[in-house]
Image (cartoon, rainbow, N blue to C red):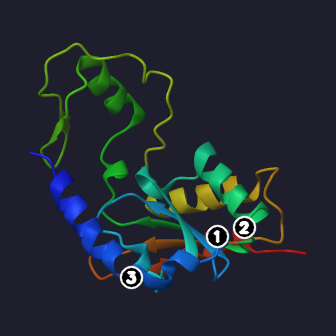
Amino acid sequence: MSVLSEVLAANEVYSASFGDKANLPMPPKRRFAILTCMDARLDPAKFAGLAEGDAHVIRNAGGRASDDAIRSLVISYKLLGTREWFVIHHTDCGMETFTNEIIRNLLANSLETAKFDGQNWHDVGRGPGSRAGEYMEFLTINNLEQSVIDDVERIRSHPLVPNNIAIYGFIYDVKNGRLIEVPEANRIGRATT
């Protein structure tokens, strides 16, 4: 059962009232970027008060500072003028429910969707699987606050990231919608001139 027709119908409604959005400039108006998780419960536009054209939002599993996320942040700064970056992980993240070893074993058994029973992941599919994930780093999370600190530190220490970019670290609470500051991450991410 596909959602294709629902998405296309929603797009028709949206595009009918597109208006001045065609004139939005490419650089983000508020000159900042957010790196956060792809979790469907997070709506960065709402929790950060964004309108279209305000900021760059980069999303991946866990909101992790992967090579690709850093590539996007560097482009955001170098070519489009962002000056502040937010790294926002969140409570109850699925990336806390498995390790590299678990997902690698699941993928080796089958490529079908696995099931989570609240404690463990179980492969319910039939093979064949693939060992292609054996060397992939999935950037799982075993300590939420530490993962924010690690990601801010990874970004801050990257040779393509200038010291004048402020990098902030937060945890979004999925139970109340609040952003919780990670002071050590903010200390590491402080901009210097």
What amino acid type is highlighted by mark number 3? Lys
What amino acid type is highlighted by mark number 2? Leu
Circle nearer the N terminus (1, 3): 1
Dot label at residue 26: 1
Circle nearer the N terminus (3, 2): 3
Dot label at residue 80: 2
Q: Is 9 displayed left or right of 102 in the figure?
A: left
User: Quadrant of the rendered structure where residue 161 is?
Assistant: bottom right
Tell me whether circle 1 and circle 2 mark residues in contact (CB < 8 Å).
yes
User: Quadrant of the rendered structure where residue 178 is?
Assistant: bottom left
Q: Please say if 174 is above or below 114.
A: below
Query: Which mark is in front, 1 or 2?
Result: 1
Counting labels gives 3
Image coords of residue 8 (percent x, y): 24, 59
Question: In the rendered image, which residue does mark 3 sit on?
Answer: 46
Which type of secondary structure does the marked residue at label 2 adopt?
loop
Rendered residue at 64%/61% (across/down): 152
Cα distance between the residues tagged 1 and 3: 21 Å
